Structure formats: structure tokens, C-alpha cells
Amino acid sequence: MNKIASIRKDWKLIETLIEENRSILDIGCGDGMLMEQLEKNLNAKTYGIEINRDLASKAIARGFNVIQGNAEIDLSQYSNHSFDYVILSQTLQAMMKPKEILSELLRIGSRAIVSFPNFGHWKIRFQLLISGRMPVTEGLPYTWYDTPNIHFFTIKDFLKLCNDMNIVIEKSIGLSSRGRQFDINDSLTGVNFFTHEAIFLLSYKNYEPIKIKSSKKIFSKNSVIAS
């Protein structure tokens, strides 16, 4: 089988976070190019949801299992743990309610993969400092009045949100503006300054009931412990 090369740097890294022969939902799948890559390279069973009708139609015409819909509304149709992985690539910052979207990703998927541009990158800070205007960069190429991005956040913002939501960061990868790859670590000096783009593999903490033995019977309390 001939493998398909990624056309985007984050797609190549996303592929490295996924095991073979898994079910995947790609949110904002476009015309299905990432789905094609994962099917060919990982023998994945892929599904997609795309808000743009024309792009969804193209993906369907190419033979992919895609529905046209709004992820902020239509993810409720999927049952718990419907997929092994749910991917949200370069889209979280365009969501109306990103916190609720993260909860949905980890409800319908055992793991979630999220990538986004880092608004704390030094180029963005420098442009804002020097010009006093909203920055335009290769990662955020829109002017303030026509951008689809409505939430600008940094690596530190995302790390705090995951901590507040008890989300486990299984792996995190940063990319510099020159494409250098490195592991993101909250204690790493300058990580929020030099990370141009970030990719996170996420899951929820697993909980199980505490079983307490008595002389008469075994019962479970409502308390839980993290495993």
C-alpha cells in the first residue's frame, strides 16, 4: 500500500498520534483529504462532519462517509464513545463555545486530537506591540473584520482549561514557525512564546466505584477514585 503524504504539517503529526485500525470522526473534514490519508496510511474507518455544503458534497462524491452539519449542534446525535478518536484540527478557535465542544469530543470519542494556532507566539505579540493592530500571520491570515476565528487563546490558556476540566493530556506537540517539532511542557521555558502551532492528544480520567467490604455484604459508595 502506497502511503499518502500530508499536505499540512499538523496532519502528519495527527497521524502519528493514532493507532492503526481505529474508528475516527474528523470534525470540519473539508473535502475529506485527511480522512483519505488516515484510511490509506492507518487502515482507519473514517467519518466526517463538515459545515460547508460544497466541501461536504465533494467529500461524499469522493466516496467518504461525511454529513453536512454544524458540529456545535449536531454532535449530540452521536452516542457516547462512538469512535476511538475524534479530530478537531485548526477549528477550536472558531467555535462559539470551545469548552462545550471539548466536552463533546471526549464524550463521543475515547480520545480527542485538537490542533490550533497559538496566539501567544512571539510574532503575534510583536505585531500587536509595534503596530497596535490585530496581527495577521501565516497561522492567523485573516484581518479582524473577516476572520472566522472568534476565540484567541494561548498554550497556557489551553493547558489551564484542560486542568479545570480534568482532561488528561496524553501527548502534546509544538511546532515553531520554521517547522521545528518539540514536546510541549508547561514548565518548559518559552513554550508559550515560541510555539506557532500546537497539537494535543486528550482523554478523560477514568473513574471506578470504591468497593467497601463489610461482614455482611459488599457495596459500592458514590465516591470515586481516578485510575
Image (cartoon, helix red, strand yellow):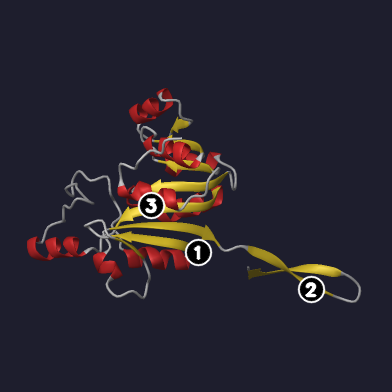
What separation in Å lies between label 3 and label 1 (alpha carbons)? 19 Å
Mark 1 lies on a secondary structure that is strand
Residue 165 lies left or right of residue 145; in this view the side is right
Mark 3 lies on a secondary structure that is helix
Determine the residue positioned at 19% across, 50% down: 138
For marks 2 and 1, the one nearer the N-term is 1
At which x and y percent is residue 7?
30, 41
Q: Which residue does the numbered mark 3 point to in the structure image?
A: 13
Task: Sort mark 2 into few (<14), some (14-19) or many (20+) by Cα contacts within 10 Å.
Answer: few
Q: Amino acid at mark 1?
A: Val
For marks 3 and 1, the one nearer the N-term is 3
At which x and y percent is residue 44?
51, 40
Mark 2 lies on a secondary structure that is strand
What separation in Å lies between label 3 and label 2 (alpha carbons)? 44 Å
Determine the residue positioned at 60% across, 47% down: 80
Q: Of residues 179 and 145, which is closer to you in this image? A: 179
Judge whether 208 appears above or below 7 on screen. Answer: below
At which x and y percent is residue 6?
34, 43
What separation in Å lies between label 2 and label 1 (alpha carbons)? 27 Å
For marks 3 and 2, the one nearer the N-term is 3
The label on residue 41 is none
Q: Amino acid at mark 3?
A: Leu
Determine the residue positioned at 51% across, 48% down: 85
Q: Which tag is nearer the camera, tag 3 or tag 1?
A: 3
Q: Which residue does the numbered mark 2 point to in the structure image?
A: 212
- Residue 115 in view (yes/no): yes
Question: Is there a contact, CB below 8 Å, between mark 2 and mark 1?
Answer: no
Task: Sort mark 1 into few (<14), some (14-19) or many (20+) by Cα contacts within 10 Å.
Answer: some
Q: Which residue does the numbered mark 1 point to in the structure image?
A: 168
Question: Is there a contact, CB below 8 Å, between mark 3 and mark 2?
Answer: no
Residue 45 lies left or right of residue 51; in this view the side is right
Looking at the image, the residue that sits furthest to the top is: 61
